[in-house]
Image (cartoon, grey):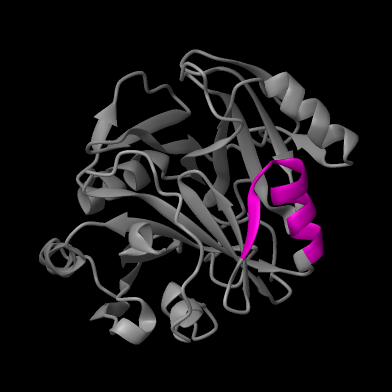
Amino acid sequence: MRNAIFTLAALVSSGVSPASAQLVSHPDAPVRIGHYHLNVTSIEAHKKFWADTLGGKAIKFGGIDVIEFPDAFLFLRVQKPTGPTRGTAFDHIGFAVPDVPAMAKKLAAAGYQETTGREPKPGDAPPAASGTSAVYGRFAYFLGPDGAKIELVTSDQKDAPPIVAHHIHFINKQYVEMQQWYMKAFDATLRPGQTDFFIGADLPGVGYSLNFFRWEGDQSITHVPTAGRVVDHVGFEVKNLEAFSKTLEAKGIKLVRPYKKRDPAMNNIATATIVDPWGVSIELTEGLDKIN
């Protein structure tokens, strides 16, 4: 893993006490999605997209800019990304909103490009930019600054909040093998309803969490690692991370950055890092949900 990957440990090494965390859903789940780290060309451009338009909250962790959503943090570092999410096996961040058409209209009015979920086969017309999901109703896809891709899905909650971080979506020629690796690593379960281009995995105690598309675009493309791209790595909050790290190693999954418990000056955050076989960097944390 490149040394340039910045970690949550680096963000809290000054011992600051950031604002109250927003990992509010499924507090008893052993593993849940917790954060994303982004390399960005412009902090202000990303604040406009994630906070002013989508509705996240811009906060500071010491001198670090963070966008806070219910159920996820986005840590922003000013470093020109080596590329967008496209071209990696990490496809997009999914958000649930009560009214997808209204949010899509707001994003379009702010100048953001609507796109498609799956890139078409060469020579084929792209799928509809938005449509209807059998699970979550209407959906839409957009590109933010530096090519950061998101999906909007219709919230299935009564009296749903304006926006909630919802799922991660990967894309790969080996999409089934990728889903199986994440099931193995995170004890996730197969979600019923897979198709010839889609398969899902549900985190224990969470449910709908991880989605996998088959790569249908230019077959000469080999997906590159996420390190250095606009979404540098994804983060999972884990209970009893030390034991979980040992279990990963027992499963044959190498820790590229070993488990380390942080001291009180670093807010007692524990971390470890792995990389999936397709180059998606993954930071594991314990304590992110207790930052206050």
In the picture, measured across the screen, residue 180 lies left or right of residue 45, that is left
Of residue 247 and residue 154, the one placed in the foreground of this image is: 154
| 163, above or below 273, in the image | above
Quarter holding residue 208: top left
Above or below — where is 207 with respect to 258?
above
Q: How many marks?
A: 0
Which sits in the foreground, 255 or 38? Answer: 38
Q: Is residue 120 magenta?
A: no
Of helix, strand and loop, which mostly describes the magenta segment?
A: helix
Residue drawn at the location 42% of the way across and 63% of the way down? 292
Report the quarter where the N terminus lies: bottom left
The stretch of residues the image draws in magenta is: 44-59
- Between 199 and 189, the residue placed more toward the observer is 189
* Above/below status of 90 relative to 14: above
Instruction: Judge whether residue 58 can be spotted in this image.
Output: yes
> Residue, x 16% and y 70% (percent of image)?
242
Residue 102's x, y, as percent? 75, 22
Relative image position of residue 39 (x, y in whole percent): 65, 69
Percent x, y of residue 8 = 45, 73
Residue at position x 31%, y 64% in the image? 287
Residue 276 appearing in the image: no
